[in-house]
Amino acid sequence: MANGFLPYHEPGTVEILIIISFFFFLSLARWISAKVIQAGIIGQIAVGIIYGVPLANILEYNWQDTFLTLGYVGLILIIFEGGLGARVDLLKQNFTLSMVCAATGVCFPIGLSYLLLYLGFGYGAVETFIIGASLSATSLGTTFAVISSASGSVNLAETRVGSVLVSAAVIDDVVGLVMLSVIGDLGKLSEEGHDINLGWLIGRPIVASISMAVITPIVTKWIFAPFFRRFIEYHFARFDHISNIILMTLVLSAFIAIAGFTGTSVLFGAFLAGAFITYLPSKHAEGPFVVVSREEGEREADKSPTFIHTFEKYLLGPQQYLMEPLFFASIGFAIPFVKLWTGKEIWRGVVYTLLMAFAKCVVGIWVPVWQLALGGKSHKKESYEQQGQGQPNNKENGASHEEQNEEEKGKRWKRAWLAAVLLGSAMVARGEIGLLIIEIGYNETPYVSDEGFITGVWAILLNTIIGPVTVGLLVRFHRQKIEEGEWGVQERSTPTSNHCGGHGAV
């Protein structure tokens, strides 16, 4: 370093073999766990536990630190891809339901935590809040990974229940990161000599998140989209993927910077960046970005591949086979595996896990409630249409129609309850956000005890396993029913291209 450069040297044979084996077992563990329990990410978390500090500590510490950073970039790409493939029309249609689901997913875990941890186990009030806050978050990375892995069977991003899931998970993530900021500063408040404005401390991330959520769609619709469509998009056809990847990089970097420096979640910024880019191009048939396939966009002189096509060509491979595995392995690095295995911590952790799984599963109850409150009108319309077609003239035909209506009503409710179970199960995984909150509460504040930390980690770990496994099994055995009905795949109101890999622009 004294000479102004890093001396190059050949890595040792053991180091090379360790790296090779690490990535090999990441891929193998994903394949095995995907086949056995329908959740490939669980195998990658297990490899991270084995190779990292929690168990064998095979990887050098600086490697683990580097992989953690690369994995977080992978998480950003996962969420950015989710924003690119999001159906903005469905997000708008189901915004109220998503807000209700998100509020339920935040309030129930914290409230039930006070019942069990504070009243039952005797933990402190602030300690209970920190642990409950860590279990109120929903893992965005796991949510989008589950949606992506299920796209081969069911394109959840195109379903109504999938859009509710995405919106609720994003809102829960933002709320979790707001609480993370507050918890991180609780340690400063507990120290002497710190003059902190508590109102601004709590209000800054809230104001920043709401501002980005409100301002982004307004300026996109009325300023950036019209400008892009009138002056820019037809020039993109000359350069195809090159112009696309440059714009995607600039927009993603800008949103990450805005989100990070204003005090909200960079993951929220990544999702907004994807949705922002998706909305920019024209949607009419003559638009350069309206293509049937990536090949048409690359071949035709007046057409351009879509942004999701560019993501698939340049970023999907590195994301799926390098950065995403590193992200889930880095979750394994952060789990205090050995400390989990004592009798008291095990039974308390399992009890708290079951309670916290219920606290998120209860979110799904809003699907049948919503259908009960708003579904009657559409059902009557359907019944009138059926009656008009048949024009029954006798009691026998009338009875037949009544039987058909009852049968269809039963099917609708079965699909609604299946969507409810799917939504609740997909919200269960806590993952990276939960671990981040509880570790900051444990390491940077004096409130969380060793016992409380282990109990919370048990619940985060087991819920991160339970959620993806349940969703994988539901998709495997009920694929067709998930796609059908008013909670299934929704038709688009505007002409768009059919994208490869199950993704679509809005």
Image (cartoon, rainbow, N blue to C red):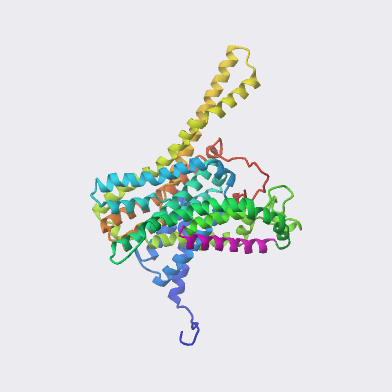
Q: Main secondary structure of the magenta part?
A: helix
Residue 108 in which image quadrant: top left
Q: Position of residue 354 (x, y in %)?
A: 34, 45
Q: Residue furthest bottom?
A: 3
Q: Position of residue 385 (x, y in %)?
A: 62, 24
| Nearest the eye: 303 or 398 | 303
| Nearest the eye: 11 or 404 | 404
Tell me: 488 left or right of 343: right
| Nearest the eye: 454 or 332 | 454
Tell me: 224 left or right of 26: right
- What residue do we see at 60% from left, 58% from top? 311
Q: Is residue 399 above or below residue 37?
A: above
Q: Is residue 40 above or below residue 415?
A: below
Tell me if residue 153 can be seen.
no
Magenta range is 240-264
Q: Is residue 329 above or below residue 118?
A: below
Tell me if residue 401 can be seen.
yes
Q: Residue furthest top?
A: 394
Q: Position of residue 459 (x, y in %)?
A: 34, 51
Residue 260 in magenta stretch: yes
Residue 471 in magenta stretch: no
Residue 495 in which image quadrant: top right
- What residue do we see at 36% from left, 46% from top? 109
Q: Position of residue 43 (x, y in %)?
A: 43, 56
- What residue do we see at 50% from left, 48% from top? 166
Tell me: 357 left or right of 312: left
Residue 67 in which image quadrant: bottom left
